[in-house]
Image (tube, helix red, strand yellow):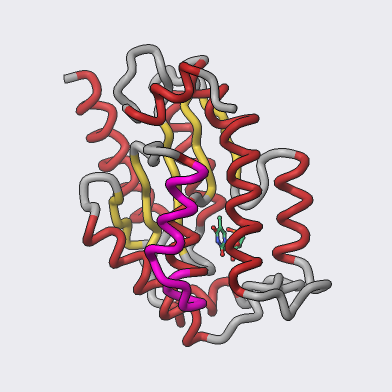
Amino acid sequence: MLNQKVNSYYQRPGEMSGLGRFITVEGGEGAGKSSNLAFIQALLEAAGKQVLFTREPGGTPLGEAIRELLLGHKHTGMADDTELLLMFAARAEHLQRKILPALEQGAWVLCDRFTDASFAYQGAGRGIADDRIALLERFVQGALRPDLTLLLDLPVETGMERAGNRSQPDRFEREAETFFNKVREGYLRIAAREPERVRVIDASPALEAVQKQIVDVMQGYLDSLDG
Ligand code: TMP
């Protein structure tokens, strides 16, 4: 059962004093997520925040075991609903064991992917209806949503070229270009619907130009909290 404090956080995400903020980063293949996540963490730490960096699916021992089931090649024919439920099982564990306790202690949680990825990959990509995913979102998260999401966006072809050198593609990386186009469109639809929370970063130029956009967004966000 969720404790009282967590319940109130669920009801008023990001608004309770003394709580950390929940920042997520999303993006398709080859969008430069890893280096940009390290950059964002450094920016937050330079601003004096205590940062917990984590990822989905994963982030806890059980979550990482579920990640192996999802990304490995042992269960290639997994049903779409199973895939979705495993994502949310890992997420429930992650939230209750790691993310919420950290937020309660005032840490800022920086998470490599979160529920937007379920809407983009399992929703737009696999074709599961949004309302079914929203049902699980509500079940697992209550009203908790990220406070800020950076979407690293770039054309699928460019991303695939960049990611092309990776040796062992996982179960998702083996998907075809049409799948990733649907995923990208799914992400962009979320950003269009929630422009305040989801900031689109053009990830196609060179790293420096991408980082400049990230600095602008992060600085703007930090300033908005001070004001
Ligand atoms: P990563 O490659 O960014 O580590 O993410 C692992 C894969 O899991 C990536 O291909 C996206 C996918 N994924 C989903 O399909 N749904 C989700 O809810 C999450 C968090 C990730």
Asked if residue 111 is among those painted magenta in the image, a careful observer would answer no
Give the residue drawn at x 58%, y 52%. 88
Residue 141 located left or right of residue 60: left
User: What type of secondary structure mainly makes up the magenta span?
Assistant: helix
Picture coordinates of residue 56, whole percent (x, y): 60, 49
Give the residue drawn at x 35%, y 74%. 185
> Quick check: 116 above or below 52?
below
Q: Residue furthest left?
A: 227
Q: Quadrant of residue 144?
A: top left
Picture coordinates of residue 197, whole percent (x, y): 28, 45
Q: Quadrant of residue 181?
A: bottom left
Q: Which residues are magenta?
A: 123-140
Count the numbered circles shown: 0
Give the residue drawn at x 38%, y 41%. 145
Picture coordinates of residue 45, whole percent (x, y): 47, 24
Picture coordinates of residue 128, whole percent (x, y): 47, 73
Give the residue drawn at x 77%, y 67%. 72
Asked if residue 131 is among those painted magenta in the image, a careful observer would answer yes
Residue 79 located left or right of residue 176: right
Q: Looking at this view, is 138 or 95 the one in front?
A: 138
Q: Quadrant of the C terminus?
A: top left
Q: Quadrant of the N terminus?
A: top right
Residue 212 located left or right of residue 88: left
> Quick check: 105 above or below 79?
above
Q: Looking at this view, is 56 or 13 the one in front?
A: 13
Q: Residue furthest right?
A: 74
